[in-house]
Amino acid sequence: MAQEAVLFANEAFYRAFAERDIAAMEQVWAQAAPVACIHPGWSPVVGRERVLASWRAILGGPGAPPITCVDAAAHVLGDAAFVICIERIPAVELVATNCFVREDDTWRMVHHHASGMARGAPEPEQDEPDSGSGLLH
Amino acid sequence: MAQEAVLFANEAFYRAFAERDIAAMEQVWAQAAPVACIHPGWSPVVGRERVLASWRAILGGPGAPPITCVDAAAHVLGDAAFVICIERIPAVELVATNCFVREDDTWRMVHHHASGMARGAPEPEQDEPDSGSGLLH
């Protein structure tokens, strides 16, 4: 089932991240499709070589945090898909959008966008988020 | 060309946003495909009704900011696509990932994820982002 295969690819990304496995990270990302990456607080990094260079810098650096992914939900759109999930890093939770494409019957990442969640952020269950929360939009 | 059509759909989203046009915003979002939205600092909002409710709250509220979109780049993946762009709001720049799907020959939004950019964030042109910048990943 496509949804499971996409979630499997998403898990492979976080395994490579947590294990600081550059070779596995290179396998995760699409070979042919255009790729991009938005690390928390960064401006976009565009192109496979630059994206992988950013991961080499992060995974090889002293500040690479232990990370786990929870609450992953896959939305499949034909041969593309996006996953929304929560990234747990000690003392902080991030939210991520991960986009995938099917290349040669394998789901590969084409885009990763992670960003911080404010304390008191509206819950997914909530029908009418509070517009007066002071958040931008 | 698909890329231009995707960018046109992306512009329609920001026009609806800037003009606080709820009816136009409802047209922007996919009718059939599963949708989601991550407002800056929020946890994910999932499902068309909840996503549109969040936009009604934001666009109808007193704090809806003027917004312009710049540097939009579309990455087309068959009948799906994602756009990366910068959102300019007075005094702050955000970065956004916008995902689209082709429904009945019209590109419609299935996911919006916007988040802040830190000052001094690495530039897209940079090949080797500084892993020591203190940003999380």
Image: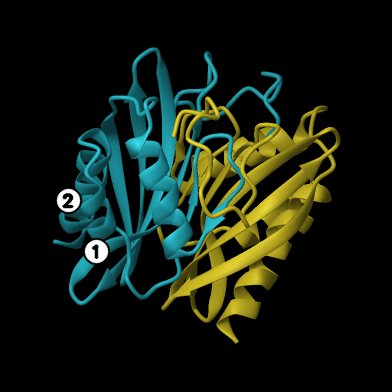
Chain colours: A cyan, B yellow
Closer-to-camera residue (A97/A62): A62
* Any part of residue A84 in sight: yes
Residue at 72% of width from left, 64% of height from top?
A: B11
Report the residue marked by disc 1.
A107
For the view shown, which residue lies furthest in the bottom direction? Answer: B1
* A2 versus A44 height, above or below: below
**Type of the residue with mark 1:** Trp
Report the Cα–Cα distance between label 2 and label 1.
9 Å
Q: Secondary structure at mark 2?
A: helix
Parent chain of label 2: A
Q: Secondary structure at mark 1?
A: strand
Q: Could you tell whether A72 is left or right of B42 in the image?
A: left
Q: Is disc 1 surrounded by few (<14), some (14 to 19) or many (20+) residues within 10 Å?
A: many
Closer-to-camera residue (A49/B99): A49
Report the residue marked by disc 2.
A8
Q: Could you tell whether A111 is left or right of A108 in the image?
A: right
* A69 versus B12 height, above or below: above
* A94 versus A21 height, above or below: above
Image location of residue A88, percent across then percent down: 33, 24
Residue at 63% of width from left, 22% of height from top?
A: A130
* Quadrant position of the C terminus of chain B in the picture: top left
Image location of residue A15, percent across then percent down: 20, 40
